[in-house]
Image: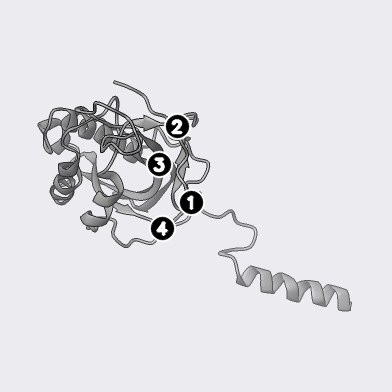
Amino acid sequence: MRRRLLSAILGSLVCAFVTACGVGGPDSVTLNRRDLSTTDATAVTSAIGATSATGTTSATGATPAEATTGGASGAASPYEDDSAVVSWRNWALAAAQAVNAGKVHTTALDELMTPDFAKQTTTLLAPQMGLTYPGPMPFTPISVTDLSPTARSLRICLVTAGFAHNRNAKASTPTHPNATKPMTVRPMVASAIYQNGTWLTSGLASENFSCSGVNPQTPTF
């Protein structure tokens, strides 16, 4: 009798710490909603604004929130069919093509963004003028969260160095300004909203989660 009573008490305590007993949890954890639609463009620019030619030397001092890799062996994510992920794939393609054309805005790129994010994108892409992307900006989504029927948040591991290269590079030495850098992957939160019948990219912010072991694929045009 005492054992049954103790078991019942323990079961009640366990149930107090979960959403419901005997019911499966959500597919993904709801993210902190801060900075999803209006982000600190300066912080993000410092993350993605200094890309350089692909290298193979591992960077030192990487933190759990900043993985450094030497290649692109990652498998496709299970989120590629998600509409918000598709919108970000399209943005990554159009943004890379805009940089290659020496522009921070193109019609193709602007059609993929909310007006507010378009303003942030100007700040993001301006430091990259003079770089050449061999393909879309690489990233791997590691989670997709529904914030509402018309808003989604993506945790992505974004390649921020080691993919684009300086089109005027003449050398690749440790002391040369165009020196090769190792591929670096940073954690980001990307947001998307459903508006006027389509999903639009709406924000990009640095985040603190681990991209360790994530090797985004780097397809070319």
- The dot on residue 184 is 3
Q: Between marks 1 and 4, how big is the CA–CA gap?
A: 14 Å
Which one is in front, 175 or 101?
Answer: 175
Locate residue 172, reporting x and y percent: 32, 30
Q: Between marks 1 and 3, how big is the CA–CA gap?
A: 13 Å
Residue positioned 21% across, 54% down in the render: 41
135 above or below 28? above
Q: Quadrant of the N terminus?
A: bottom right
218 above or below 51? above
Circle 4 is placed at which residue position? 31
The secondary structure type at the circle numbered 3 is strand
How dense is the environment of label 2, judged by Cα within 10 Å: few (below 14), some, or many (20 and up)?
few
Between discs 3 and 4, the one toward the N terminus: 4
Q: Between marks 2 and 4, how big is the CA–CA gap?
A: 33 Å
How dense is the environment of label 1, judged by Cα within 10 Å: few (below 14), some, or many (20 and up)?
some
Q: Is residue 123 visible?
A: yes
Between discs 2 and 4, the one toward the N terminus: 4
Between discs 1 and 4, the one toward the N terminus: 4
CB under 8 Å between discs 3 and 4: no
Circle 2 is placed at which residue position? 56
Q: Indicate the amino acid at tag 1.
A: Ser
Between discs 2 and 3, the one toward the N terminus: 2
Circle 1 is placed at which residue position? 210
Q: Nearer the viewer, mark 2 or mark 4?
A: 2
Q: Between marks 1 and 2, how big is the CA–CA gap?
A: 21 Å
Which one is in front, 39 or 37?
Answer: 39
Number of numbered discs overlaid on the protein picture: 4
Residue positioned 51% across, 53% down in the render: 26
Locate residue 185, reporting x and y percent: 41, 43
How dense is the environment of label 3, judged by Cα within 10 Å: few (below 14), some, or many (20 and up)?
many
The secondary structure type at the circle numbered 1 is loop
